[in-house]
Amino acid sequence: MSEQMRIMRSKELPEELRDRIVARHRSGQGYKNISAALKVPKITVASIILKWKTFGMTRTLPRAGRPAKLSYRGRRALMREVKKNPKITVAELQRCSQEMEESCRKSTITAALHQSGLYGRVARQKPLLSARHTQACMEFAKKQRNKILWSDQTKIELFGLNSKRYVWRKPGTAHHLSNTVPTVKHGGGSIMLWGCFSAAGTGRLVANEGKMNAVKYRDILDENLLQSAQDLRLSRMFTFQQDNDPKHTAKITKEWLHNNSVTVLEWPSQSPDLNPIEHLWRDLKMAVHQRLPSNLTELERICKEEWQRIPKSRCEKLVASFPKRVLLLNTEQRV
């Protein structure tokens, strides 16, 4: 084989030479004669003529980019490893690819996973529920959930929303006033809130001063629970949900609930993330911090305003999805 043919195999043919190949083909010359006359490999001649017949042109078509370092077989093997062990690290996957003689960088493996719809995320922490806990969840999931009054407490900080806020800005303007959010030491203060809701909408929202204890909790129930049930047009046969916090199970609290004939939903231990009100707390905090309250008094006022603005449809959807979440939890526990 001539030196010229070796060179042509390693570089792209000029468009003028490709046109000459097609011209000779159209004049009736065979692949072998064209290859010998123009000193172009026969397989290259065949490829250029096929492209001309297919696309009507000889110039180079747009390409997808650099060839993939991982073969289809190697990519499938990595997917199998991830499916077997979702907690496997990229370094371990890299060693797997080396064993398959497809050595590549960690960034290549990460890109391959992304193309397959897999992304690295922090594993959620989920309470380990026993079979008894799961059975308890299933029991109250079957109850008349539309008559349940859900409750919980949360802390909301003046400047302490635990999420990032993104801004569009030019380089060098990171500290411009319009591109920053206000922060102060220790969050600028906070308030504790107690709230309740049902499928019919949100009930009362109460701010508590100081540390919550059983006596304060009893007083909150005395002033707000029955009134909330009445405002939401729940019958006296409604069921009250609260978690197993010590102040909720204290003697003084149990006595008040008994004296007022309030039925309490048996809440399994180690299942705080099941309460649908957690989603409403997140909605509330996002809405409040978009209004940028400047002091605790304003924070409390805005919290109550935004709580009342939560649409009934949002509450209905959360309550309706509760049994599905319990079933999903039950299924995941078996995996």
Image (tube, rainbow, N blue to C red):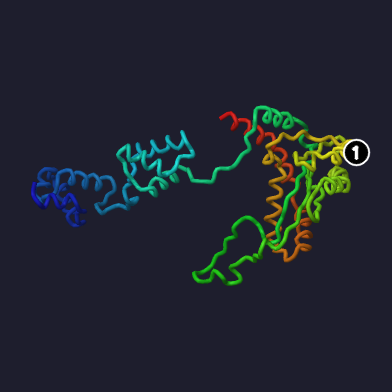
Task: Relative to 177, say whether 297 is above or below.
Answer: above
Dot 1 amino acid type: Asn
In the depicted structure, whether residue 145 falls above or below residue 155: above
Q: Which residue is nearer to you in this view: 322 or 191?
A: 191
Q: Is residue 258 left or right of residue 292?
A: right
Q: Secondary structure at mark 1?
A: loop
Residue annotated with mark 1? 260
Q: Residue at x 56, y 30 (%)?
A: 335
Describe residue 205's horizontal placement relative to residue 275 as left or right. right
Q: Is residue 231 visible?
A: no
* Location of residue 160 by image quarter: bottom right
Could you classify mark 1 by the number of other residues whose Cα lies within 10 Å: few (under 14), some (14-19), or many (20 or more)?
few
Residue 114 spot, x, y in % from top left: 45, 46
Q: x%, y% of residue 94?
A: 37, 43
Q: How many marks?
A: 1
**Residue 32, x across and y down, in percent:** 11, 43
Q: Nearer the viewer, residue 278 or 98?
A: 98
Q: Look at the image and tell me whether residue 242 can be seen.
A: yes
Up-down: is 208 above or below 259?
Answer: below
- Residue at 67 percent across and 34 percent down: it is 326
> What's the residue at 18%, 46% (across, down)?
44
Of residue 324 and residue 326, the one placed in the foreground of this image is 326
Give residue 159's quadrant in the image: bottom right
Residue at (78% x, 34% y) in the render: 265
